[in-house]
Structure formats: structure tokens, C-alpha cells
């Protein structure tokens, strides 16, 4: 096995190509009416980017998004164009070593300032809010639910999009005030429909999609699915065969990192503590396993 430092990409540098934004995980470049989205191997936990990257993380995020975009291509408009570097504009070809397998060329759209979160199970901030109020984002739920309980009907729980820190849950009324009633209704309809379709497919592959967040943009006065979709970074994936409500579930994401950090006396502010190699590798395995189970193939 290659040393971790040789098998991760923490930051891209595409000289001469306009950098559009650099987030916690993705480097985005602007190419006229298109964007190049590059998923690095950076990992953030508790809103702090770790020093160590996770091998294959960026490739899993990109390849899994490509899989889902293809899965829904005949039903939902999305921004994905291609992930083949050979089909990218010629100015990008010299950077193939940084882009291969972890980048997507997409259409540019005007993003809605909302995270469209759909929850089919009670977990995370939803579980925390339910325990305190009996509701999630203003939606009253039945009494007596447990952590990880399956909801009879998935619920749409929007959130604000934070550039730094955590996204903040908002009510339906707040969303309408931000984007308008017609747009809010359309985004809710699209998000719930996409969640139900993907949840059914994932269950057939042994994975529960407990919740997920979608991002939508506006292009030619139509809603368009943008950003990543149904990845371990944007969704809570649980193994179906291990599911047991009433407790936290094992998951296919960075939970090993979170659990390790919770065991330390760390104030969750930069700089982050170093991650042991076994924590990094176990996290990488979980990302790759999610890809394999959902697509039926090993990561190429």
C-alpha cells in the first residue's frame, strides 16, 4: 500500500485557470458558462479541515455523483456534463493528473440559497431537535420516536447554506420568505421525489439512506440539480442488515474520524489534532465500500 501522503490530493493548482471558489472539500474553477468541480481528499470534522487527507475520498464523491446523475438523467434536469478529462476544454488537459477520476465539468446555474434536506429517519440534528421540541423544522412528529426511527413519510426540512460553520435548520415559512412560494414548492416536490426514488434503489443494494441534502440552481427559469448528489458527504448511509432503532447507527462516512476526535480533549477549534493512520485508512475503506455497494463495482 502506498503511504498516505502519496495517495491523496489536498489541493489543486490549475495555473492559468480562474479559481471560482475553494471550499472545505471542493476546488471549483470557472470556465465561461461552465464550472469545473474538483473533489479533493480533504476532510472536515466539526467544521475544521483536518491536516490529513482521506485516500480515494474525492474519487468516491465524484464517481458516486456521476453514478446518480446517470441514474436520474431521464427524470430530473441536472448540471452534469462529463467527467472525462479528454472531453474537457483543451486548457485543462495539462492538469489531467490532478483531475482524472475526481472532477466534473458542469453547467453553471444560479444556486438557490437553501439546502434541501430530506429525512426518512430521525438522526443527527433532527433527532436533537425532536427530543427538545417534538418537531423538526416546525414539522410535528408522533410522540415516542427513538433515535434512528424510520418516519412513515419522509419530511422536507430546509436549511440555510453556510459558507463557514454549520448549516442552520429553518422552517418552511422561512424558506418561502427566502425563495418565494412557487420555487419553494417545486424544490420540495423535486427533493422528496428524488429521495424516495434513490432510497428504494439503495435499499435494494443493502444501504439505508437515512437523510440527504440536495442543492438546486436556476438555469433558463428551470430548477436544476447541482453540486454533489447522494454521496457519503451529503447523505447519511447506514448498512441495512445492521439497522436497529434506538441508538446511533454505523455509517459509511467520516464517523470514525468524529468518534476518534470525540475521544480527545480537543476544543474543536483549529488547529486540528493529527489523525492516526488506522483512523484515516478505516475511513477510506468506508467511503470505498459505500461506492461498491451502491454501484455494484469497485472504485475504478
Image (tube, rainbow, N blue to C red):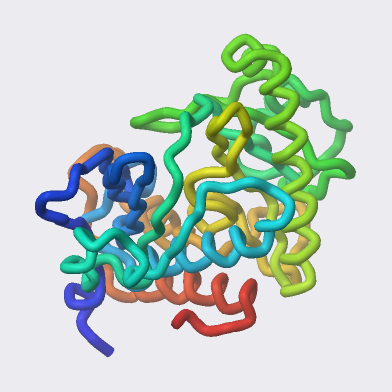
| 257 vs 184: above or below | below
Residue at figure coordinates x 34%, y 75% from the top left: 278
Asked which quadrant contains residue 156, the reply is top right
Quarter of the image that includes the N terminus: bottom left
Say if residue 131 shows up in the picture: no
Pick whichever, 184 or 155, lies toward us.
184
Pick whichever, 87 or 216, lies toward us.
87
Name the spot of residue 240 as percent of width and height, x first.
Answer: 74, 68
Name the spot of residue 287 as percent of width and height, x first.
Answer: 48, 69
Say if residue 174 shows up in the picture: yes
Asked which quadrant contains residue 184, the reply is top right
Q: Left or right of 218: which side holds 164?
A: left
Name the spot of residue 51 as percent of width and height, x first.
Answer: 21, 56
Q: Left or right of 153: which side holds 16?
A: left
Residue at figure coordinates x 21%, y 40% from the top left: 270
Pick whichever, 245 or 77, lies toward us.
77
Q: Find the residue positioned furthest to the left.
A: 15
Residue at figure coordinates x 20%, y 59% from the top left: 91
| 227 vs 6: above or below | above
Quarter of the image that includes the C terminus: bottom left
| 30 vs 13: above or below | above
| 21 vs 286: above or below | above
Name the spot of residue 112 as percent of width and height, x first.
Answer: 53, 27
Q: Find the residue positioned furthest to the bottom.
A: 1
Amino acid at each position: 500500500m502506498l503511504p498516505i501522503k502519496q495517495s491523496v490530493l489536498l489541493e489543486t493548482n490549475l495555473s492559468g485557470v480562474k479559481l471560482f471558489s475553494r471550499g472545505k472539500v471542493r476546488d471549483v474553477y470557472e470556465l465561461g458558462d461552465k464550472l469545473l468541480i474538483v473533489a479533493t481528499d480533504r476532510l472536515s470534522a466539526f467544521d475544521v479541515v483536518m491536516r490529513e487527507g482521506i485516500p480515494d475520498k474525492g474519487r468516491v464523491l465524484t464517481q458516486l455523483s456521476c453514478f446518480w446523475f446517470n441514474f436520474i438523467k431521464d427524470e430530473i434536469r441536472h448540471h452534469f456534463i462529463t467527467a472525462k478529462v479528454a472531453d474537457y476544454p483543451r486548457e485543462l488537459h495539462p492538469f489531467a493528473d490532478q483531475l482524472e477520476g475526481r472532477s466534473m465539468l458542469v453547467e453553471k446555474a444560479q444556486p438557490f440559497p437553501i439546502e434541501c434536506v430530506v429525512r426518512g429517519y430521525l438522526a443527527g440534528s433532527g433527532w436533537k431537535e425532536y427530543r427538545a421540541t417534538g418537531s423538526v423544522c416546525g414539522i410535528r412528529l408522533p410522540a415516542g420516536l427513538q433515535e434512528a426511527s424510520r418516519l412513515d413519510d419522509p419530511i422536507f426540512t430546509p436549511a440555510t447554506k453556510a459558507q463557514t460553520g454549520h448549516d442552520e435548520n429553518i422552517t418552511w415559512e422561512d424558506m418561502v420568505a427566502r425563495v418565494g412560494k412557487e420555487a419553494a414548492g417545486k424544490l420540495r416536490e423535486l427533493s422528496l421525489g428524488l429521495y424516495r426514488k434513490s432510497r428504494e434503489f439503495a435499499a435494494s443494494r443493502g444501504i439505508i439512506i437515512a437523510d440527504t441534502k440536495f442543492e438546486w440552481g436556476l438555469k433558463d427559469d428551470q430548477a436544476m440539480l447541482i453540486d454533489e448528489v447522494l454521496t457519503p458527504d451529503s447523505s447519511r448511509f447506514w448498512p441495512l442488515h445492521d439497522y436497529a432503532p434506538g441508538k446511533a447507527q454505523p455509517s459509511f462516512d467520516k464517523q470514525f474520524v468524529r468518534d476518534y476526535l470525540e475521544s480527545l480533549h480537543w476544543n474543536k477549534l483549529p488547529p486540528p489534532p493529527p489523525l492516526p493512520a488506522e483512523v484515516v485508512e478505516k475511513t477510506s475503506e468506508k467511503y470505498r465500500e459505500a461506492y461498491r455497494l451502491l454501484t455494484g463495482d469497485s472504485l475504478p
